[in-house]
Amino acid sequence: MSQPRYSAVAAAGFAAFVNIYAIQALLPTLCGVFHTSRASAGLTISATTLAVALFSPLAGLVGSWMGRRQKVLIAMAGLVFCGLGAASSSGLETMIVWRFAQGMFLPLLSSAIMTWLGEDSQPASVGHTMSIYVAWTSVGGVCGRLTAGILGYHFGWRTAMVVLALLTGAAAAVLLAKLPDRKASPDLQGLSPGHMLGLLREKRWRYTLASGFCILFGVVGVFSYVTYYLAAPPFSLSPDRLSLLFLVYLLATVVTPMAGRLFSRFGYARSFRYSSLLGFAGILLTLKPYLPVVLLGLGLCAASGFISQSCVSGYVSSIAGERRSLALGLYLSAYYLGGCAAGFVPAWAYAAGGWTGCAALFAAVYLTSATALAARLRGSDQRS
């Protein structure tokens, strides 16, 4: 079993996140351009994540019938095409449709990449390899948000979205050049929806799916709605400056690979607990109306999200066995359902209590992950 090539892992992580949340930096702008509410603008994020959630189980099933490079090629072509379509949108509704279509292709990419990492990594290094992939998703997230915020402010949101599509194409070229191919296994071609239902009947899988939901709900919700908080007094940040706040993701880029080495020592369940508590501490710091403290808190929230994702996805890959493609499809579905809910649910908390109301919501999610969910995973984690 050969170890995955670093350049391919990096390109895969970058491509997976460069588009999907880049529009967060444009939310206040879209509210003004399309004369719409925060909740409606948030649907540009929720539409994508909803599509990912709905199509992830199907991607896990279909992905078991296709070769590795074939899956990646189809996914990348769809992401680029739909990204260009979103840039040509004449209104918010059209953009939401294109963003939904873009989300349909992302599960095929994510399922192919995460299955590849599980298949080609040594068993003892799955967590570390997954942490490198997740770290590069943070690089893609930073690059996408900076591109959207800075180019959108100076040249318009359409230009920003065209450049994002081109960046996706560049990542696709690197990934396809370096990705080792693997044909579909005849044994895996017999997998069916019944096998998915079998996974759902297992208690540990249900708690794992709930963990994935909470992880992305926290990351997407915090970084979507903090833009409204920082665009208002006393901060009053402009859209291009708001995009710079996503540089705190670089903390996650540095910390996540290092944290991956600790999974073998502490186990996935304990690592998930500690990373969730890190997010809880971060959200409390954002309540201090002093920008450096808010940025520190956001950095902790970002690190928490990416460490938790590499931790739980590594756990899934390590216990799924031959059902890896299906299991990762189900996990990604729950994960992105959390991101979908984060596009609009915090809007009600924000309307009721401003950023303080949002912070209370996210703090509750972090505490639930650190206590109830981490404890349930512990029973299935031999190293915990």
Image (cartoon, rainbow, N blue to C red):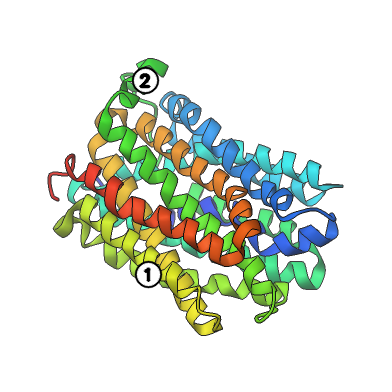
Find residue 248 and report its horizontal and vertical position in percent.
Answer: 49, 73
Q: Nearer the viewer, residue 133 or 232?
A: 232
| Location of residue 78 with respect to 342 vertically, above or below | above
Q: Nearer the viewer, mark 1 or mark 2?
A: 1
- Which of the two residues, 196 or 348, is positioned nearer the viewer here? 348
> Circle 1: is it few (<14), some (14-19), or many (20+) Cα within 10 Å?
some
Which is nearer the eye, 191 or 303?
303
Q: Residue at 38% of width from left, 36% of height from top?
A: 328
**SS assignment at label 1:** helix
Residue 212 vertical placement versus 23 (above, below): above
Whether residue 288 sits left or right of residue 189 in the image: it is right
Residue, x 46% and y 27% (percent of image)? 66
Residue 6 visible: no
- Where residue 126 appears, as percent x and y from the top left, is 26, 49
- For residue 365, side relative to residue 156 (left or right): left
- Residue drawn 29% across the image and 41% down it: 317
Task: Identify the secondary structure beneath mark 2.
Answer: helix
Q: Three-letter amino acid code at disc 2?
A: Leu
Q: What residue sits right under mark 2 in the picture?
A: 197
On the rendered structure, is 85 left or right of 124? right
Q: Disc number at residue 94? A: none
Q: Amino acid at mark 1?
A: Ala
Residue underneath mark 1: 281
Number of other residues with Cα within 10 Å of mark 2, as a class: few under 14, some 14 to 19, many 20 or more: few
Name the spot of residue 373 as percent of width and height, x first.
30, 46
Residue 316 in view: yes
Placement of the N terminus among the 4 image quadrants: top left
In this orientation, which residue lies closer to the viewer: 255 or 178? 255
Quadrant of the rendered structure where residue 166 is?
A: bottom right
